[in-house]
Amino acid sequence: MRIPCMIACAVLLALGLAGCASYRHQYGMSFFISSVGTGRGADLGGLDGADQHCQALARAAGAGHRTWRAYLSNSPTPGSPTVHARDRIGKGPWQNAKGVAIANDLAELHSNNPLNKQTALNEKGQMVNGRGDTPNEHDILTGSRPDGTAMAGDPSKTTCGNWTLSGAGAAIVGHHDRMGLRDDAASRSWNSSHPSRGCSLEVLRASRGAGLIYCFAAN
């Protein structure tokens, strides 16, 4: 009877480990890069549409029980207040789909965080193409300054009209792989590297982007 008992214990242990892995993925993930854009370039349907996109991707990955927010800022317009990306995503901590810590709080996220190509994974736990890959998709839409606050100025030049334009315009992007044409602070910034060349998906792709966004669990 010892052998069947040992086999039963091994089966239960295996099931338990599988359950732990599933739990870690479903309940632990609190950050990801969207695996796909909306298909409309930087027209995300505003902040609400971007949040819905994050929520839908998280739900498909088994993490829909959390409240997901897009890491995006809105520049001020008449009748529309400034919105800072850092104020939308909760207080942390955050970790990727494989349980790797991204930041404990907002201060760490906007200072010395470990985000790079190996850790800034999508909701499926996969790496996102970066510099050296074909296609390079390291331009992630943010509309933000390095500290996570909104850019001043014309929204059509900083946030593609607060995420409603899919033609002419520009939006601030960051490099998730922390690499660029130069070895400077902007090229290494995950959230504030340079303006895009336009707002359409075609132009974003041509300038090394894909209309992808950062998604954070706010709770």
Image (cartoon, rainbow, N blue to C red):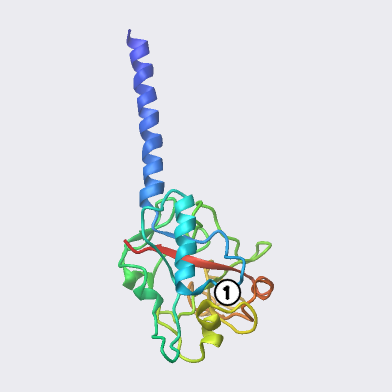
> Which of 57 and 99 lies nearest the eye of the viewer?
57
Residue 178 in percent (x, y) is at: 52, 70
Disc tally is: 1
Point 31% across, 61% down: residue:
219
- Say above or below: 77 vs 55: below
Residue located 43% across and 48% down the image:
62
Instruction: Name the outermost residue toward the top.
Output: 1
Q: Which residue is mark 1?
A: 42
Rendered image quadrant of residue 14: top left
Q: Residues within 10 Å of mark 1 (few under 14, many from 20)?
A: many
Kindly identify the residue that appears in the image at 45 percent across and 73 percent down: 47
Secondary structure beneath dot 1 equals loop
State whether residue 115 appears in this view: no
Q: Amino acid at mark 1?
A: Ala
- Foreground residue among 42 and 212: 42
Residue shown at 55%/58% (left/top)?
35
Task: Examine the rendered structure and indicate whether residue 131 appears above or below residue 81.
Answer: above
Where is residue 136 shown, x and y percent of the image? Answer: 64, 66
Q: Nearer the viewer, residue 208 or 82?
A: 82
Q: Quadrant of the N terminus?
A: top left
Horizontal and vertical percent for residue 65?
36, 53
The answer to whether residue 149 of the structure is visible from this angle is yes
In the image, 103: left or right of 127?
left
Depicted 144 relative to depicted 118: above or below: below
